Image (spheres, rainbow, N blue to C red):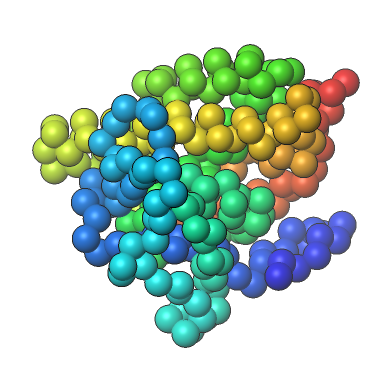
Amino acid sequence: MCAAFTPGADAFRPCRQVYHSNLEDPNAEVVCGCAILPMKTTTKGPAPVIQDGAHTLHPHSHVRGSDTHPRGLSLAAPNAPGDDFIDEVLGFFKANVLFKSFQPAGSADRVLLYLTLYTTQALAKCVTCETAPVALKALTAMAHENFAIPGDAGFTLGSFYSPPSTSHEGDLCRAYLKQAREELGRRLITKVYLDGSPSKLWLARAHVHTYDSTPRTAHLGHPCAHAVGRRVLARAHP
């Protein structure tokens, strides 16, 4: 469980455990440090498509906990049957986004990290969208924007990802991340606009992150996350 939020000088307290991916697969193809994982989607791209009713946990998948991380900083919650890595990102998001740091433990974790940070950007876009159709159009356009990949100067998490060794690997990485961004945007809308209007609980997480690309740990949360979230809501709902 996460430590409770209490106002004061030490207002932000990191949680004891962080959610890691259950979908690590040593047989998965890896591009720029990211595993190309199966996805439930109709969006074209390099990810293998999961058919309806299929289970995404691979034979080599396992739950990593404090037994393999002595510092007790990881936890992988069990996936529901049929979940893919997009479901993982959105299912873990509300907890993981409040952590001060995240240490990727594998190629699936790097996908989880990238898409967690992308989700905050997508939520920031939703702040200005009053309806689901408007948000869908905005997030689809955002997914297709020219974005940085590992190896590019604008990629802020470079120390966790390897640059492409060939132009083909770079193109494959970009196509995979674009496919994942578009699919994540579609599913995010179904959660944010459940009753037709934006969820304040989701939009409160649309805050700006700090990126500390140290060799071991990515900083996900901002010490003033709750305050920033309140300011976002104030702008969205004057």
- Residue at figure coordinates x 33%, y 49% from the top left: 37
Q: Give the quarter of the figure containing the C terminus.
A: top right
**In the displayed structure, does residue 103 sit left or right of residue 97?**
left
**In the displayed structure, does residue 198 sit left or right of residue 18?**
right
In the depicted structure, whether residue 15 falls above or below residue 164: below
Residue 224 point in image, percent of width and height: 74, 47
Image quadrant in which you'd find residue 215? bottom left
Image quadrant in which you'd find residue 39? top left
- Residue at figure coordinates x 11%, y 38% from the top left: 166
Residue 228 point in image, percent of width and height: 75, 39
- Residue at figure coordinates x 36%, y 67% from the top left: 61
Q: Can residue 226 be seen?
A: yes
Residue 175 point in image, percent of width and height: 29, 31
**In the displayed structure, does residue 101 sit left or right of residue 24?**
right
- Residue at figure coordinates x 52%, y 48% from the top left: 87
Residue 17 point in image, percent of width and height: 60, 70
Q: How many numbered marks, from 0 up?
A: 0
Q: Can residue 157 be seen?
A: no
In the depicted structure, whether residue 181 falls above or below residue 2: above
Q: Give the quarter of the figure containing the N terminus.
A: bottom right
Looking at the image, which residue sits at the far front?
53
Residue nearer the viewer, 225 or 92:
92
**In the displayed structure, does residue 172 sit left or right of residue 113?**
left
